[in-house]
Image (tube, helix red, strand yellow):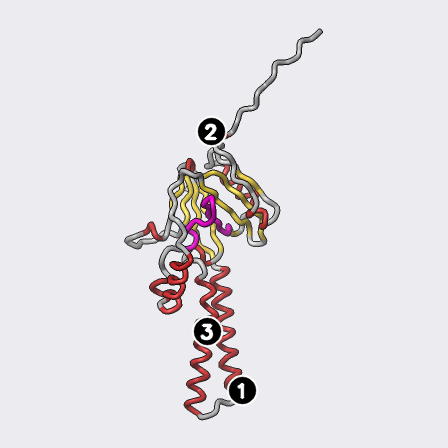
Amino acid sequence: MDGTVICLVRGPASRYPRGFVWLIPVWFAVLAAVALLVGRNASGRLPFWLGVTEIGGLAIAAVTVFCVLVTVRKRAFRADSHGIVLGIATRRRRPRLRQVQLVWPEIAQLRMVPRRYGAMLEITLSPAARTVRRPGIPMQALLLLGSLVLPLGFGRGRPALTTPAGDPPRYRLKVYDLNPAQLREALAAVRPSAVPVRVLTKKPALRFAVPPQAPSQVKPVSQQPPAPVA
């Protein structure tokens, strides 16, 4: 589509809540314990080779599922002259839980860091932007507990990509197959000049970068008249 930048987003953040991928080892640990318990009760004494085979098979399956979720790619970033849309397209009755729309006046700045898969993009919002606050620690614990018991129910709530974090609020996503220079060039056609773009060299620099000041807070530099020529 002309005038629209569409990028692939890497990782499970576009589909699952924050911390969902770390439940995989817990699930397979429970399955391994159940397999050993059933095998011991059925035969009286589980042979060593059979136990190693079952645990090894479950470990390989856990690693496979983990790698698939970590490297999965979805079209979850779209930018045009109106703003940025984060999240995958859906036909659900409540798509606002799966997507978030950011207009350019609500975006304070964009920051990019080169990564081996492409670029990590951070979208910092202005103080006047309307955001959905990240749940507190107790609520996050309850959501993870619900996802552990009912992954198909609680695990299909609001994705981590559409929930801002930090102060000031910001969204962070992994853009696949585009380095910061290419992404910056692609966004130049749709991004207003008032939204600054910064390219950082290392990922830890995202923690210490200071958000840009609003235009109203920038003090004009006084100009002194030139000295008279003798």
Image depth: mark 3 or mark 2 in front: 2
Q: Is mark 3 in CB contact (under 8 Å) with mark 2?
A: no
Spot occupied by residue 143 in the image (x, y as percentages of width and height): 38, 61
Is residue 18 visible in this depiction of the protein? Answer: yes
Instruction: Identify the residue at horizontal 50%, vertical 41% (top origin).
Output: 110
Say if mark 1 contacts mark 3, CB within 8 Å: no
The image shows residue 32 at horizontal and vertical percentages of: 46, 78
Q: Is residue 2 visible?
A: no
Going from N to C along the chain, the mark reached first, 1 or 3, is 3
The residue positioned farthest toward the bottom in the image shown: 44
| Marks 3/2: CA–CA distance | 54 Å
Query: Which numbered dot is residue 49?
Result: 1
Residue depth check, mark 1 versus mark 3: number of the one nearer the observer: 3
Based on the picture, tell me whether residue 170 belongs to the magenta stretch: yes
- The numbered mark at residue 28 is 3
Q: Is residue 29 above or below residue 167?
A: below
Residue extent of the magenta highlight: 160-175
Pick the front one: 176 or 194: 194
Along the line of sight, the residue nearer the viewer: 210 or 54: 210
Q: State the SS at label 1.
A: helix
Q: Residue furthest top?
A: 230
Q: Nearer the viewer, residue 102 or 3?
A: 102
Amino acid type of disc 2?
Answer: Ser
- First in sequence: mark 3 vs mark 2: 3
Which quadrant is the C terminus positioned in? top right
Residue drawn at x 59%, y 44% as measured from the top left: 200
Q: Circle 2 is placed at which residue position?
A: 216
Q: Is residue 29 left or right of residue 95?
A: right
Q: Estimate how packed mark 1 is, as few (under 14), some (14 to 19) or many (20 or more) residues with alpha carbons within 10 Å.
A: few
